[in-house]
Each structure stands twice: as C-alpha cells, then as structure tokens.
Image (spheres, rainbow, N blue to C red):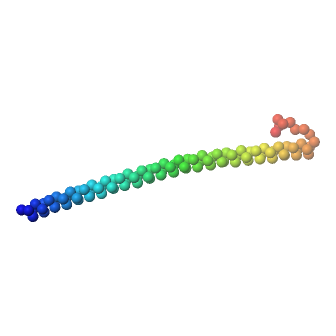
Amino acid sequence: MNESDDSVSNTRRDDFRRRDSRLVRQTFIVVLILLCSGFIVGGSIELLFRYRESVNNIWMLQAEMAKGAAFKIQRFMHGLEETMRASSGTELSSKAV
C-alpha cells in the first residue's frame, strides 16, 4: 500500500506543478502583453505630440520667412519709389504708394 500512496502523492505533486507552471506561464504572458501594449501606446502618443510640435515649428518658421520676404519687398518698393522720384524730378505723395 505504501507504493500506491507514493504514486498517488507523486501524481498529485505533478498535477500541482503543471498547474503552477501553467499559472506562471499565463501570468507571464498577460504581463508581457500589458507591458508591450503600454510601450506601444506610450510611443504612439509621444510620436503624435512630436508631430504636432514639428508642424507648429514649421508654421512659425514659414511665418518668420514671410515677414522677412515682406520686409525685402517693402525695401525694394521704397527704393523703386526713390528712383522714380529722382528720375522724374517731381515729388510723389506717400499716400499714392
């Protein structure tokens, strides 16, 4: 009877070990999935904010370049006005331009 008790207890121990190993494996898989999804979501959010920041910086750069171009055009027009005044010998009113 002693051998049968040992075999039954060994079988029970093996069953518990299998259940424990399954539980550990399932817990590991769940934790791994949660971590991976957290990293993916976090990375996606960071990419979204960086994209928005880059777009905002591009808009600011374009606005600054447009202001610079407008200033150059204004200087060119002022120079053209001065040249026309000098060549015609008449005074142009500043309201006309």
Q: How far from the left and from the top, in percent, is residue 97?
A: 82, 39
* Left or right of 25 on screen, residue 15: left
Single out the residue that lies furthest toward the left. 1
Considering depth in this image, is 5 or 86 the residue closer to the camera?
A: 5
Q: How far from the left and from the top, in percent, is residue 63?
A: 67, 45
**Residue 41 sits above or below residue 12 on the image:** above
Query: Residue at 33% across / 53% down in the picture?
Result: 30
Single out the residue that lies furthest toward the bottom. 3
Question: Where on the picture, by quarter, is residue 29?
Answer: bottom left
* Left or right of 58 on screen, residue 10: left
**Residue 35 sits above or below residue 11 on the image:** above
Query: Residue at 25% across / 56% down in the picture?
Result: 20
Query: Residue at 57% across / 47% down in the picture?
Result: 53
Single out the residue that lies furthest toward the right. 89
Single out the residue that lies furthest toward the front. 2
Question: Where on the picture, by quarter, is residue 78?
Answer: top right
The tally of labels here is: 0
* Left or right of 31 on screen, residue 10: left
Query: Residue at 18% across / 59% down in the picture?
Result: 13
* Left or right of 40 on screen, residue 70: right
**Residue 47 sits above or below residue 4 on the image:** above
Q: How far from the left and from the top, in percent, is residue 73?
A: 77, 46
Question: Quick one: quadrant of the N terminus?
Answer: bottom left
Considering depth in this image, is 80 or 69 the residue closer to the camera?
A: 69
Considering depth in this image, is 54 or 71 the residue closer to the camera?
A: 54
